[in-house]
Image (cartoon, helix red, strand yellow):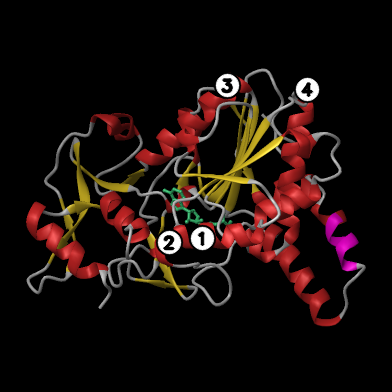
C-alpha cells in the first residue's frame, strides 16, 4: 500500500470527503510522500516523457521565439527568463544554448525557476550548473520586471475540481471512503455553484465540467506582470478551448492506472482549459495553436535537417522519430496546444498569431 493511502483515509475520516483538488494537491506535493516531491518521474524509465526530453529542438525553438519577442519589445536591459515546472531543466538548457548569440540577450537575463519539488530542484541545478539561478516557490514570488515565461506540461499538474450537472445545480465529485476504508469516488449533494452559472447554457444533465482555481490565479499573476512590465509567456499543454468531460487521469510507467489506486505513486493530470487561462490574463493572448503548427512555423524542419547531417544509423532514426513525435497530428502535434500571453499592442511571439 502507498504511504499516502492511510494519511488520506485518516483525513477523510476526520473531516469528510475531499475535493479532487485537495486529493491531487496531496498526492503530487505532500511534503514527505508527494509524487513530485520525492522523485524525478520523467523519461523512459519514469512514468511519462515530455517534449524537451524527446528532442533538443523543442527548447531551442521556444527560446528563440521568446528572444525574438524580447527584441520586438525593444530589448529591455533587464528581463526575467522564468520557467514554471521545469522538470529536469532540459528545456531551459536548450533555450539558453540556442539564444547565446542573440546580441545582448544573455547579459539582460535573470533566470528563475518556479519549482515545488526539492527532488527536481536538485536535478535542475545539475543540468544548469553553469547558470546563476533563482528558484522560487510560486509565480507571485518572482522579482518584478519584464517577464519571459515558459510553462510546458505545468498547468496539467495543477489540482482540478470536477462537477456533474444535476438539474439547475451541480454535484461535485469527491474522494471518500468505502466500507473497507479504501478510497472511492463520491458525489456531493446537488447545489448551485455561482462560478459555473455560465456553464448552465452549454451543458446538459449529467455533463462533467472541470475547473482549475490555481491555474486561473497563476495566469492572472503572469498576465498582470506582463501587462505592467512587458514580456511574454508561452503556455504549452494538452487540452482545448472550453472544458467539457472528465479528463482526470493517472499514469504510472507510461500506462493509465486508476487515479485512486496508488496515491502519491502515479502522475495525476487533467487537460488544460485554455479559455479559462486566456480569460484570466489581463492582457492580450494569442490564438490557441496546435504544437505541430507552432513548431513548423518556427522552422523545426530546417533545424531537424541541419541536425540530421551529423547523424546516421539508429541515432538518425531516433532523431527523425522525435521530429515526427513532436509535430505529427497522430502524435503530439495536435493534442498539445500553445497559448501566448503578451502585452496589449504588441505582436505575439513568433509561431503564433492573434
Ligand atoms: N516542464 C517539464 C516538466 C513537466 S512535469 C518538462 O516539460 O519536461 C511538471 C513539473 O511541474 C515538475 O517539475 C513538477 O515538480 C512541477 N510542479 C508541479 N506542480 C507544481 C506547483 N504547484 N508549483 C511549482 N511546480 C510544480
Residue pictured at 67% horizontal, 51% vertical? 92
Give the structural element (helix, strand or loop) at label 4: loop
Cβ at disc 2 under 8 Å from ligand 1: yes
Q: Is residue 244 left or right of residue 219?
A: left
**Can residue 88 be seen from the camera position used here?**
no
- Of callouts 3 and 1, the N-terminal one: 1
- Nearer the observer, 123 or 246: 123
Residue 281 point in image, percent of width and height: 50, 28
Residue picked out by circle 1: 120
Q: Of residues 216 and 328, which is closer to you in this image? A: 216
User: Which range is magenta?
Assistant: 303-308
Q: Using the numbered discs, state the Cα–Cα distance from disc 4 to disc 3 in whole angstroms.
A: 15 Å
Q: CA distance from mark 1 to mark 4?
A: 34 Å
* Disc 3 target residue: 227
Residue at the image position 63 percent from the left and 63 percent from the top? 331
Residue visible at 85% across and 82% down in the picture: 313
What mark, if any, has residue 74 been given in the picture? 4
| Residue tagged 2 | 36
Residue 74's quadrant in the figure? top right
Foreground mark, 1 or 4, reads: 1
Q: State the image coordinates of residue 195 (x, y, percent, origin top left).
A: 29, 31
Does label 1 or label 2 sit earlier along the sequence? 2
- The mark nearer the N terminus, 1 or 4, is 4
Quadrant holding the C terminus: top right
The numbered mark, 4 or 3, whose residue comes first in the sequence reads 4
Q: Are marks 1 and 2 in contact (CB under 8 Å)?
A: yes
Amino acid at each position: 500500500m502507498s504511504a499516502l493511502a492511510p494519511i488520506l483515509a485518516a483525513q477523510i475520516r476526520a473531516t469528510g470527503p475531499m475535493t479532487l483538488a485537495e486529493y491531487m494537491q496531496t498526492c503530487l506535493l505532500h511534503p514527505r510522500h508527494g509524487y513530485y516531491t520525492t522523485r524525478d518521474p520523467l523519461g523512459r524509465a519514469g512514468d511519462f516523457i515530455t517534449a524537451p526530453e524527446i528532442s533538443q529542438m523543442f527548447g531551442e525553438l521556444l527560446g528563440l521565439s521568446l528572444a525574438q519577442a524580447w527584441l520586438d519589445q525593444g530589448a529591455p536591459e533587464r528581463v526575467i527568463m522564468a520557467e514554471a515546472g521545469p522538470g529536469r531543466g532540459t528545456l531551459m538548457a536548450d533555450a539558453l544554448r540556442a539564444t547565446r548569440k542573440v546580441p545582448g540577450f544573455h547579459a539582460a537575463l535573470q533566470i528563475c525557476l518556479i519549482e515545488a519539488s526539492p527532488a527536481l530542484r536538485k536535478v535542475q541545478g545539475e543540468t544548469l550548473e553553469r547558470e546563476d539561478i533563482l528558484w522560487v516557490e510560486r509565480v507571485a514570488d518572482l522579482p518584478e520586471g519584464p517577464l519571459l515565461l515558459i510553462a510546458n506540461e505545468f498547468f496539467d499538474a495543477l489540482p482540478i475540481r470536477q462537477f456533474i450537472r444535476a438539474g439547475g445545480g451541480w454535484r461535485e465529485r469527491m474522494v471518500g471512503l468505502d466500507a473497507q476504508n479504501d478510497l472511492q469516488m463520491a458525489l456531493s449533494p446537488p447545489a448551485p455553484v455561482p462560478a459555473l452559472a455560465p456553464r448552465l447554457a452549454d451543458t446538459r444533465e449529467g455533463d462533467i465540467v472541470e475547473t482549475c482555481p490555481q491555474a486561473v490565479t497563476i495566469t492572472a499573476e503572469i498576465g498582470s506582470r506582463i501587462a505592467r512590465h512587458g514580456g511574454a509567456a508561452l503556455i504549452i499543454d494538452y487540452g482545448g478551448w472550453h472544458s467539457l468531460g472528465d479528463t482526470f487521469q493517472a499514469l504510472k510507467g507510461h500506462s493509465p492506472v486508476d487515479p485512486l489506486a496508488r496515491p502519491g505513486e502515479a502522475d495525476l493530470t487533467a487537460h488544460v482549459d485554455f479559455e479559462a487561462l486566456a480569460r484570466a490574463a489581463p492582457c492580450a493572448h494569442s490564438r490557441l495553436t496546435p504544437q505541430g503548427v507552432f513548431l513548423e512555423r518556427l522552422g523545426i524542419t530546417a533545424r531537424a535537417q541541419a541536425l540530421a547531417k551529423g547523424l546516421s544509423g539508429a541515432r538518425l532514426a531516433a532523431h527523425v522519430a522525435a521530429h515526427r513525435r513532436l509535430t505529427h497530428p497522430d502524435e503530439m502535434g495536435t493534442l498539445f496546444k500553445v497559448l501566448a500571453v503578451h502585452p496589449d499592442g504588441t505582436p505575439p511571439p513568433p509561431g503564433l498569431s492573434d
